[in-house]
Amino acid sequence: MTVQDKNETARRIAELAPWFHNLTIDGIDTAPNHFLGDYPRFKYEGFRHALPDDLQGASVLDIGCNAGFYSLEMARRGAGRVVGIDSDPHYLAQARFAAEREGVELDLRQMDVYDVEALGEKFDLVIFMGVLYHLRHPLLALDLLYEHVVGDMMLFQCMQRGPDLQAAPVAPDYDFNDPEPFSREDWPQLWFIEKRFSSDPTNWFIPNQPGMEAMLRSSGFTIEDQMEREVYLCRRGERGEMVPPPPRIVTAG
């Protein structure tokens, strides 16, 4: 690579700032002073072993792909098709630039998680990392993923708060007049943020660990592995009792 090429890369990185994903493009870090450190690479190192080393021919959907860190990693593992969606065109522009510089083909689309039915296909692996707590309708999102795009595996992460506890055993029913379960720390909980959390107005719901796992199970996902406190590898299983399919999208013809 010539000095001129490297200077051009540095110029484009600066032009596309700010970056939330720290990528290394042509030897230059996009977010070297990230407040979380080398993010998201340092998190990826904690669970990368749980994913197949060889994704040859597999289809991957990366929801909330941001600048494309996970999309690029899956392409490096040989995925046959990688689709990345994000509602923010700024992040998609970053991902396109990173993919172009790496010589990787990504199918990048500006799309909301609630619109995944429009993709019209199920994927071998769905990556749903760091998105759920930004959603006004988190269970609807999980139901839509189950119904329309998760064909087999889902790599999932959600911010959690509360003590590090194993969930209470799930009883088949609870007495209407018994308040005791609701005072337990190991009861599934989901805290609603009315205004801002960490200066972000899109942080809406934060679960505790029992709450997050219960939501996954209720939406039909079987937790196969928990690689870190907030990171799960799930498979498509059976829906919970009385969980209907989400409404289908009706478009004007």
Image (cartoon, helix red, strand yellow):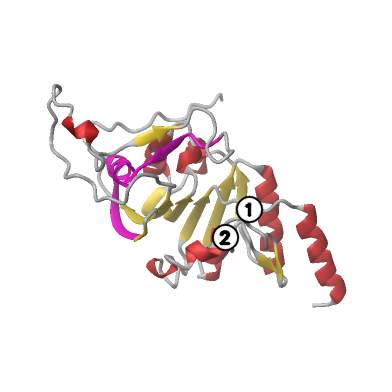
Sequence-earlier tag: 1 or 2: 1
Tell me the element at label 1.
loop
Q: Residue at x 48, y 34 (%)?
A: 204
Q: Which residue is mark 1?
A: 20
Name the residue at 83% across, 71% down: 5
Q: Residue flagged by tag 1: what amino acid is it?
A: Phe
Q: Residue furthest bottom?
A: 1
Q: Position of residue 30 (x, y in %)?
A: 69, 61
Which of 57 and 171 lies nearest the eye of the viewer? Answer: 171
Q: Which mark is residue 39?
A: 2
Q: Amino acid at mark 2?
A: Tyr
Q: Are marks 1 and 2 in contact (CB under 8 Å)?
A: yes
- Magenta segment boundaries in residue numbering: 202-226
Seen from the viewer's position, the closer of residues 61 and 94 is 94
Tell me how far mark 1 sits from mark 2, CA to CA: 8 Å
Q: Is residue 44 magenta?
A: no
Q: Residue at x 66, y 49 (%)?
A: 92
Q: Quadrant of the N terminus?
A: bottom right
